Image (cartoon, helix red, strand yellow):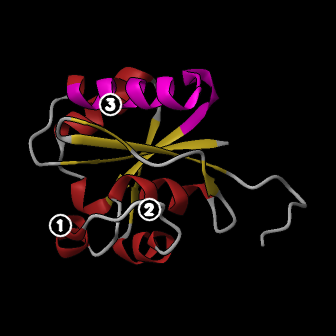
Amino acid sequence: MIVAGVGSRRGVTSEEVCAAVRGAMERHGVKLCDISLMATPAAKGSEAGIIKAALDLGLLLVMVPQRQLEAAGTRAMTHSDRVVALMGVPSVAEASALAVAGRRSTLIGPRFVLGPVTCAFAREAEKGAQTP
């Protein structure tokens, strides 16, 4: 299972979100058919652009509670002081993807940034896989 984590500034459009997801797919060699879910912080639950983008891409959108976001944020690859100050995690996209993909999940790569949107992919750990 691959989860697409999405972070954004307020008021993004679905086109901006879709473009960032597609850009991240191209960068990391991920196909849309490989993505199981889209994840974003529960605090972004009113962002119509994110909600519509998930629908446009045919993905179920999962809203991640702050506590789970913070727990997964310790495994993020990138760090933004601005995002830490605003959201309490180093990367919203990375933390969202990791939180939904599971405790032993890993990022496919660092977040992809396109304008006001970030996207990161996390892969669920294979059954029986050991974490370091």
Query: Going from the N terminus, do you reach mark 3 or mark 1 first?
Result: 3
Residue type beneath disc 2: Ala
Picture disc at residue 29: none
The secondary structure that most of the magenta stretch takes on is: helix
Pointer 3 residue = 20
Pointer 1 residue = 82
Query: Going from the N terminus, do you reach mark 2 or mark 1 first?
Result: 1
Quadrant where the C terminus is found in the figure: bottom right
Q: Residue at x 90, y 61 (%)?
A: 128
Pointer 2 residue = 95
Q: Secondary structure at mark 2?
A: helix
- Packing grade of label 2 (10 A; few <14, some 14-19, many >=20) is many
For this orientation, the residue located farthest to the right is: 128
Q: Secondary structure at mark 1?
A: helix
Q: Secondary structure at mark 3?
A: helix
Quadrant where the N terminus is found in the figure: top right
Residue type beneath disc 1: Arg
- Packing grade of label 1 (10 A; few <14, some 14-19, many >=20) is few
Q: Look at discs 3 and 1 and give the one toward the viewer.
A: 1
Q: Where is residue 120 drawn, in percent x and y?
A: 45, 45
Query: Looking at the picture, does residue 2 appear above or below residue 43?
Result: above
Contact, CB < 8 Å: mark 3 with mark 1?
no
Q: CA distance from mark 3 to mark 1?
A: 20 Å
Side of 132 relative to 91 (left or right): right
